[in-house]
Structure formats: C-alpha cells, structure tokens
Image (spheres, rainbow, N blue to C red):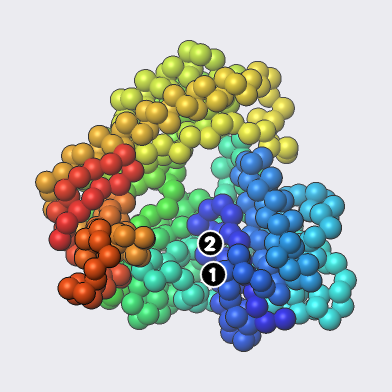
C-alpha cells in the first residue's frame, strides 16, 4: 500500500489541507500519484458549499473504486463533517474523516489496512477552540503556495452551512505562518495566497491586538516572496485604516475578491450579510482610489428565497454600476440545517437559471472590456506552466496571460528551430498584443 492519490473539491483551504496530507504521506515513504492513475489509497477532500458540491463529492468517491477495486477510499473534509450518515451508505467508502482528523490521516489509513474495519472519525468542530496545526507545509505548486492562516467562521449567513462544517474562528499563530512562508521562499516559490474560511476575522480570537494587516506587514518583509495574494475578503474589512497600511506593501497583488452575494439591501438582510449597498459602494471607491489597476471580483447568489424581480433588477443594476472584472454566479441551493432552507418564497429553478445566465453574460462582457484596456500596454507576469502551445501565467492584478511558445512555425520541419528557453517560475514584463474574454495575449 504505497501509492496515494488525492481529489480536492472546493476552496483553497481544502487545497492547502490536501497539500498537508500529501506531505504527511510523503514523509512516511508513500508515493503521491495523479488521481487518474491506479493507486492503493484514494483521498477525496470533499466540499459541501452547495448541493452540487455534495453530489460531486459522492460521484468522486464511487468513481475511484472503479480504478482499483481493492483501494482504500477515504472521504474527508466538509461534506464528511456535516453528512456522515449519507457517506456511511456509500459502500465504496472505507474511512470517513472530519476536518480535524485530516492531521492524523496516515495513522488512520494504516490502522484500517490492518483491521479492515470501516471507520468513522469525526470530532465536533463546534467544540474546537484552537487552530489545528499541520506544521510547516512546503509541498505545493511550483510558483504559488496557498497559506492557510485561520479556520472557522462566526458570521452564520442564513444560506451557509460552512460554520457547522468548520466551527468557530480559530487563528493560526503568526510565528507559525512566517516560519512556513520562509521555508517556502527558500524552495523558490515567488507567490503566496493568504487563505482561510474567513480571513477578515484573523486575530479576533487572540488576546493581543494583532490583526490580518499586521500579519501582511510581516509577510511583506520575507525575502524571496515577490507577490502576496489575498483570498476571498469580507467587504467590511476594507476600511480607510486598513487600506492606508495596505498600499505601503509593495508585494500585495492588486486583486481583491469581495464577496457581495446580492446588490439589493432587502436580500442582503435576509441573507444576514452585515453591510449595505452604499457601504459596499464606498469600499469599492476606496480601493479604486488607491489602486489604479485594481481588479475586483465577487460572488453572487441568484434566486435566494424571496428574491423578487424588483430585487433581482436592483442587483443587476448595481453590478452594472460596479463593473466587477469577474462574477462567480451561484444559483441558490437549499442547505439542510441553515435558516434559508426553511424560508418561504423558494424560487423556481427555471427562474434561477434565467437570472444566472443574465449575470454571467454581464460578467463575460466586463471581463473582455477590462482585458481590452491592456492592449498595447506592458504588464508584469509570473509564468506558471506550459499549456499546449503557450506559456501561461498571471499579471499582478490576476489577469490570465498567454505567450505563444517560440518556434511555432506550423510545419513539420524542425531542423532550424532553436531550443525554447524555459520561463516557468520567472517574473517578466511583456507587451499585451491582444485581448480575449478570459485572458490576454502577450509578446516578449
């Protein structure tokens, strides 16, 4: 039993925890392989943010057994945390682990291999008071590392199951974060993505006065790290004081994902979001005032219970005004155990689909228009990978950029071609020569 494969569903926190579990297996002399290969152990790190996430989690758990019927199949993560009874019905699953149990995954898998006894290991995360530390996680991508700085959420939005899957806010000690990033920098990683379940709450559980901005100022000093990217942000984090300190940090990427959810105050109130449209507008103006090239993205839920045509139209007009670069549009999904699931005024699926399509069309237009502004301009790109006939990377404000590989002459004669110079994991400047809806093309 020496080959292990992972499938990660959901957010960047799950990606970090998958990296941590993979590192644990590697340290015990296991080989990590792609999930499409035949492995002895398959670990599915599940998500439960929507009904679609639940369904995909179940599909993946059943599918991997087809690759190797003798493999150990492990379900862990958020869906496992809140729906253990559903997972127990899936014959293919051997081990069901909650979020806190991920840190003991190798031990639990090895125990199962010896006993062949189907196990269920899930601690009540609502009782968890301290951040569960994996240690320094340096197993990551070549150019970008996800850094988890906190867990849990205290907001309890009426549509969201995540506080029940992740528990209350627990912040990671800053010295642990700095230690991990220092080691990652020595590995040659140039960009870190600061993530958590609700990173705006970072530090609120500390006795001392230490917040997210204090942590970012420390990370900005780390030699070797060139970019600091922030994960999804609670809009109310963005205050004058926060931005005044943030603009002094030259490594901060000028991309902010502000989770809006609705552009109508009445809908926001039912969602238990704690800001108004006017407050959100002021936050956007503050960022645009301080970052000329700022890139703003967001999440939107359509078809929330009670959302009338008037409320949706208010959302649409507000989104037209703000002009987000990209909007991740979700059709409201009933989550058992949340307040919204039992609200009156549940919206018809066809209506949700119609509203979703309208917002996606708006998002696509905004994205293309924003990208077109860069044609003829020079941009700085961190190159991440070769992708077919192109190099792919991202600008500092998170525009996807492609550069055609050299020697693409379209013919079969390769005799006069020179070797392509490798630019992966380098940061270079390039001129934008064309813009598409979801990326720009550059030439060096």
Residue lying furthest top: 310
Find residue 425 and report its horizontal and vertical position in percent: 30, 70
Quadrant of the rendered structure where residue 237 is?
A: top left
Q: Quick check: 82 above or below 370?
A: below
Quadrant of the rendered structure where residue 314 is?
A: top left
Q: Quick check: 250 above or below 437?
A: below
In-image side of 123 versus 371 (left or right): right
Marks 1 and 2, how far apart in space?
A: 6 Å
Quadrant of the rendered structure where residue 249 is?
A: bottom left
Query: What secondary structure is marked by label 1?
Result: helix
Label 2 packing within 10 angstroms: few (<14), some (14-19), many (20+): many
Find residue 261 and report its horizontal and vertical position in percent: 48, 33
Residue named by callout 2:
15
Residue named by callout 1:
19
In-image side of 57 versus 27 (left or right): right
Q: Residue at x 17, y 56 (%)?
A: 443
Q: Kindly tell me whether residue 296 is visible in this rendering.
A: no
**The label number, if any, that marks residue 374 in the structure image:** none
Q: Nearer the viewer, residue 186 or 384?
A: 384
Tell whether label 2 touches label 1 (CB within 8 Å): yes
Q: Residue at x 48, y 13 (%)?
A: 310
């Amino acid at each position: 039993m020496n080959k292990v494969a992972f499938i990660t569903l959901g957010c960047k926190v799950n990606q970090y925890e998958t990296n941590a579990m993979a590192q644990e297996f590697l340290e015990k002399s296991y080989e990590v392989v792609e999930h499409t290969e035949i492995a002895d152990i398959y670990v599915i790190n599940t998500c439960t943010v929507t009904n679609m996430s639940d369904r995909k989690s179940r599909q993946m758990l059943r599918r991997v057994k087809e690759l190797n019927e003798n493999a150990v199949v492990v379900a862990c993560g958020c869906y496992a945390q809140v729906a253990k009874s559903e997972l127990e019905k899936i014959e293919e699953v051997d081990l069901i682990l909650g979020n806190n149990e991920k840190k003991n995954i190798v031990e639990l898998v090895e125990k199962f291999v010896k006993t062949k006894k189907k196990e269920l290991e899930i601690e009540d995360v609502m009782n968890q008071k301290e951040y569960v530390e994996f240690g320094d996680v340096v197993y990551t991508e070549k150019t970008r590392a996800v850094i988890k700085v906190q867990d849990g959420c205290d907001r309890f939005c009426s549509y969201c199951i995540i506080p029940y899957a992740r528990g209350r806010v627990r912040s990671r000690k800053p010295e642990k974060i700095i230690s991990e990033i220092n080691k990652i920098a020595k590995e040659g990683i140039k960009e870190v993505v600061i993530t958590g379940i609700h990173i705006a709450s970072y530090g609120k559980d500390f006795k001392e006065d230490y917040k997210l901005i204090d942590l970012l100022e420390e990370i900005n000093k780390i030699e070797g790290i060139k970019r600091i990217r922030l994960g999804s942000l609670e809009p109310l984090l963005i205050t004058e004081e926060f931005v005044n300190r943030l603009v002094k940090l030259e490594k901060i990427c000028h991309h902010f994902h502000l989770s809006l959810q609705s552009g109508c105050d009445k809908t926001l109130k039912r969602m238990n979001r704690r800001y108004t449209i006017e407050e959100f507008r002021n936050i956007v103006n503050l960022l645009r005032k301080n970052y000329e090239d700022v890139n703003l993205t967001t999440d939107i839920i359509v078809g929330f219970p009670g959302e009338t045509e008037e409320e949706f139209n208010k959302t649409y007009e507000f989104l037209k005004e703000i002009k987000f670069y990209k909007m991740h549009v979700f059709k409201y999904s009933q989550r058992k155990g949340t307040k919204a699931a039992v609200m009156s005024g549940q919206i018809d699926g066809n209506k949700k689909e119609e509203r979703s399509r309208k917002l996606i069309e708006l998002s696509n237009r905004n994205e293309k228009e924003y990208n077109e502004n860069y044609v003829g301009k020079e941009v700085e790109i961190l190159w991440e990978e070769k992708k077919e006939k192109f190099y792919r990377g991202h600008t500092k404000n998170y525009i996807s950029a492609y550069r055609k590989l050299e020697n693409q002459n379209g013919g079969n004669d390769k005799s006069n071609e020179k070797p392509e110079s490798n630019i992966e994991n380098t940061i270079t400047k390039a001129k934008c020569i064309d813009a598409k809806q979801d990326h720009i093309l550059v030439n060096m």
